[in-house]
Amino acid sequence: MKTLKRDWWKVVLIIIASSFFNMILHGLLSPLNSSNISLGEPSIFVKKGMLVPAIICWELLTFGILSLVFVLIQSNIPGKRLTKGFLYGLSFGVLYIIGMFESVLLFNSRIYNEFLMGLADCISFVLAGILLGIFTGTDEMKKIKRDNIFAVFIIAFFYVIGRYLAYSVLHIQSAYIIKPLGTFIWTLGLGLWVGMIYFILQSGIKGKSIISRGLFFGIIVFGSNWLMNHLFIFAILEFSLDNLKRAGTDILFTIIGVCVYKSYMVKGNNL
């Protein structure tokens, strides 16, 4: 964390700049309207006329977490600082784009509108990643052996299992009965991308044991950013456990997927 102590003011400026850039971009590409709020009971922030301050707080916290995780893991990731920052921002930017398409299944919203909303986040995340890479990153030319691409499919497999347990047992809001094919394609696609995030950022994952590495990726790297995605809705609609169960299940089964994969690799290397 020496980088944070030395460059904390750069990180703060990047968080503020990226947050307000994202709000401006959303205002241009996907402004909030009454249809967003009509999906449920308005939140206390909407009722009290505090929606804008709530969104500003969410933006700052979201980009704050995104930035802190990058600072925490970037020194162990090989490559040029600009490339590392770009790939880091792109990883979570694409995650947000894919995540937005669930609304098409749940609320019959337009694919184009959801894409624009996700695109605004993606561009902002890539910008934040590039800035973090340039101003806080380091060039690491050391060669590190990557895990097998098979990791992507194992993590996706467990992600899909977790989601369908959440659909059928925890009864989170879903369209898996009335739109089974679309739900499966979306769930698999998101699971594959979570696996890709692991594959791209695996060198930065800390921990000596299989479980600690699974927890670090599932909670710190993926989970903290994915949770913020789910918390945004509470700025608009009243609090519901549904989104927390959704994010919690995703995080838990991602951890399981990473641990199973790492266990498989250890056994394979011992043969």
Image (cartoon, grey):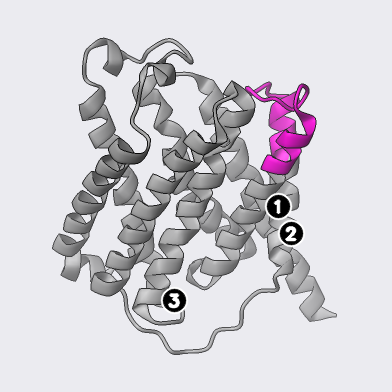
Instruction: Using the numbered discs, state the Cα–Cα distance from disc 2 to disc 3 in whole angstroms.
Output: 24 Å
Identity, as a three-letter code, of the amino acid under mark 1: Ala
Q: Which residues are magenta?
A: 162-186
Q: Tell me whether the residue at label 2 lies in contact with that at label 1, contact meaning CB atoms closer than 8 angstroms.
A: yes
Q: Which residue appears at 59% of the width and 57% of the height?
A: 214
Which residue in the rendered view is the most extreme toward the bottom?
142
> Mark 1 = which residue?
156
Q: Is residue 59 above or below residue 269?
A: above
Where is residue 68 drawn, in percent x and y? Answer: 32, 57
Q: Earlier in the sequence, mark 3 or mark 1?
A: 3
Residue type at tag 2 = Phe
Residue at the far left in the pictured view: 9
Q: Nearer the viewer, mark 3 or mark 1?
A: 1
Q: Nearer the viewer, residue 267 or 90?
A: 90
Looking at the rendered image, the quarter that the C terminus falls into is: bottom right
The x and y percentages for residue 44 are: 31, 14
Q: Residue at x 52, y 37 (%)?
A: 112
Please state which of the two labelled residues, at mark 2 or mark 3, is closer to the viewer: 2
Q: Mark 3: which amino acid?
A: Asn
Q: Relative to residue 63, is residue 27 depicted above or below? A: above
Question: Which structural element holds mark 3?
Answer: helix
Dot 1: element: helix
Q: Which residue is mark 3?
A: 76
Residue 137 lies in the magenta stretch: no
Q: For the residue carrying disc 1, how many other residues have a C-alpha within 10 Å: few (<14), some (14-19), or many (20+)?
A: many
Q: Which residue is mark 2?
A: 153
Are discs 2 and 3 less than 8 Å apart at CB?
no
Badge 2 local density, few (<14 within 10 Å), some, or many (20+)?
some
SS at circle 2: helix
Residue 76, horizontal then vertical, whole percent: 44, 76
Disc 3 crowd, CA 10 A, few/some/many (<14, 14-19, 20+): some
